[in-house]
Amino acid sequence: MNILTPDAGLLFWMLLSFSVVFFVLAKYGLPIVLGSVQKRKEYIEQSVKAAQEANERLGGIQAEGEQLLLDARSRQQEIIAEAMAEKQKIVKAAQEEASTEAHRIAEEAARRIDAAREEALKDVHDEVAGLALQIAEQVIRQKMQDDAEQRAAVERLLEDF
């Protein structure tokens, strides 16, 4: 018996046992292995597909986020412009109100000055009328005989006042 060259009987039995094992594995083991490989392949394909969809959604979300940021900045500029316009309107209204109030105060002061002047003129007029009455009274009290003496007395009284 030579170790390097097998016997025909040994070859027959080895071939027969190999065929039985191959048949059993092909009938029962290979479908299970192929099913597992197929499931794994489908799982990997679904994972790749889900990753691509997530990547696309992420790209869409990034674009949407950038758009929202641009919109927010635009709205911020609008709000700032509206606030500046409102500030200018309020300042202008305050200036107009202050101008109106100053004009009213000036008119009130002018009216009071006119009233004080009128009162002063009335007081002067009353004083002059009172003085005229006093002069007339003194002239009447003095019993003068001629017109020259009356004129001289009136002139003296006028000089005294």
Image: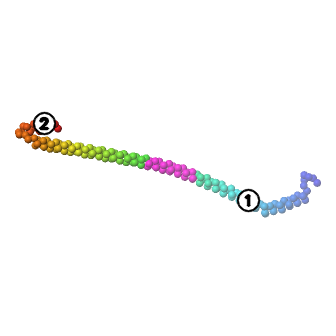
Q: Residues within 10 Å of mark 2 (few under 14, many from 20)?
A: few
Residues under labels 2 and 1: Cα distance?
Answer: 146 Å
| Magenta residues (range) | 60-83
Q: Give the quadrant of residue 109.
A: top left
State the residue at coordinates (86%, 60%). Answer: 17
List x then y, in percent, for residue 26: 79, 61
User: In terms of sequence position, does the residue under pointer 2 or pointer 1 come before the other?
Assistant: 1
Rendered image: mark on residue 120? none
Residue 95 x/y as whole percent: 36, 45
Q: Which residue is mark 1?
A: 36
The residue at which mark 2 appears reads as 156
Residue 49 located left or right of residue 6: left
Q: Amino acid at mark 1?
A: Ser
Residue 76 included in the magenta stretch of the image: yes
Residue at point 11%, 38% (across, down): 153
Considering depth in this image, is 90 or 104 the residue closer to the camera?
Answer: 104
Task: Residue at 70%, 57% (x, y): give it.
Answer: 41
Say whether residue 146 is magenta.
no
Quadrant housing the C terminus: top left
In terms of secondary structure, where does tag 2 sit? helix
Tag 1's secondary structure? helix
